[in-house]
Amino acid sequence: MQKEKENFRLQIWITILSIVLFVAKITAYYITNSVAILSDALESIVNVVAGFIGLYSLYVAAKPKDMEHPYGHGKAEFVSAAAEGTLIVSSGIFIVYETVENIIEKKPVQSLNSGIGLIAITAILNYIAGSVCLWMSKRNNSLALKASGKHLQLDTYSTIGIIAGLLLMAVSHLYWLDKILAFIISIIILYNGYTIIRASLAGIMDEADKKLLETFVTFLNKNRCENWIDIHNLRVIKYGSTLHFDCHLTIPWYFNIHQAHKQVDALEQLIKQHFGSSIELFVHTDGCLDFSCSICPKTLCSERKHPFMQTVEWTFDNIVLNKKHNADLIQSK
């Protein structure tokens, strides 16, 4: 629960900062009348709303497990990220609308120097806050903080682009560049909003994280024990910062309950040492069968029926299958 509390406290500061930066950017817009700066300000108001949504989701995610939520409340983070992604897409659409309206009404751009100074300060603060969010999200495995961090850093990059465009306008007096810049920013915002929504929906729908599974499989191959004859039917479900691993572990059939339990404990300890303590592991143990002998590397086995032929290298494709592996179906590396 300590990680969830850390995430919540950080989100409070991010929300407060978002409010301050929005006020600064909207002030810069009224000073300059630049639609590009308005687009930056609109993204900041999304930061404010998304900050409160993220704050609530992290508050919910920090709640302990209960009878109604035996896996905890971590899924709230995915809902928060989906809401934030939706708001980002909405702001992109609104920027396009404001840009078109500005072209029609032909509002003049003015006082660029003052506006550039204000949004330059917001860019620096945004990047620092985004970096802290991404660092904390990686340490605590929080999708909500990752979404906030990416959004804040994206806001920084778009602000830098706006500053460059405003400087060019100030030198060249080509004020029509303001509209083009706003259009470009809106496309970037729409794309990044889509990627955040896509990631959050994947979490809500328990979509397989292939990259995580491949990392997991590589680690198991390097640290396998000779009593772990086979691992299959592997699944990973994310609940916020907690990962739930399910798998079937094939061990020698003659192991008693205590010996089998020791193998499961060894597997769990190995995984937690590498992937962190926020992991729940559910292992179903299978006893080996005669056809397992050909892929079993156990050297001292009095019950061996067939000679050892090859070691099965676990891969993403074969470790998720709901069946025991054998030498006929798996080719050695």
Image (cartoon, rainbow, N blue to C red):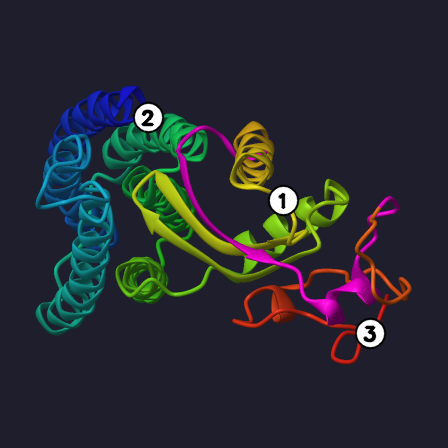
| Mark 2 secondary-structure assignment | helix
Res. 175 visible in picture: no
Relative height, residue 48 to residue 91 (above, below): above
- Residue 138 picture location, percent across and down: 45, 34
Q: Which residue is mark 1?
A: 255
Instruction: Give the residue at x 32% y 26%.
Output: 125
In the rendered view of the protein, which quadrant contains the C terminus? bottom right
| Mark 3 secondary-structure assignment | loop
- The CA distance from mark 1 to mark 2 is 59 Å
Disc number lying in front (1 or 2): 1
The answer to whether the residues at label 3 and label 2 have Cβ atoms under 8 Å apart is no
Q: Which residues are magenta?
A: 274-300
Q: Nearer the viewer, residue 146 or 268?
A: 268
Report whether 326 appears left or right of 117: right
Res. 111 visible in picture: yes
Q: Which residue is mark 2?
A: 125
Dividing the picture into quarters, in which one does residue 69 lie?
top left
Q: Nearer the viewer, residue 39 or 324?
A: 324
Q: Which residue is mark 3?
A: 331
Structural crowding at the residue carrying mark 1, measured as other residues with C-alpha within 10 Å and reported as few (<14), some (14–19) or many (≥20): few
Dividing the picture into quarters, in which one does residue 227 lie?
top right
Disc number lying in front (3 or 2): 3
The amino acid at mark 3 is Gln
- The CA distance from mark 3 to mark 1 is 28 Å
Report whether 110 appears left or right of 116: left
- N-terminal of the two: label 3 or label 2? 2
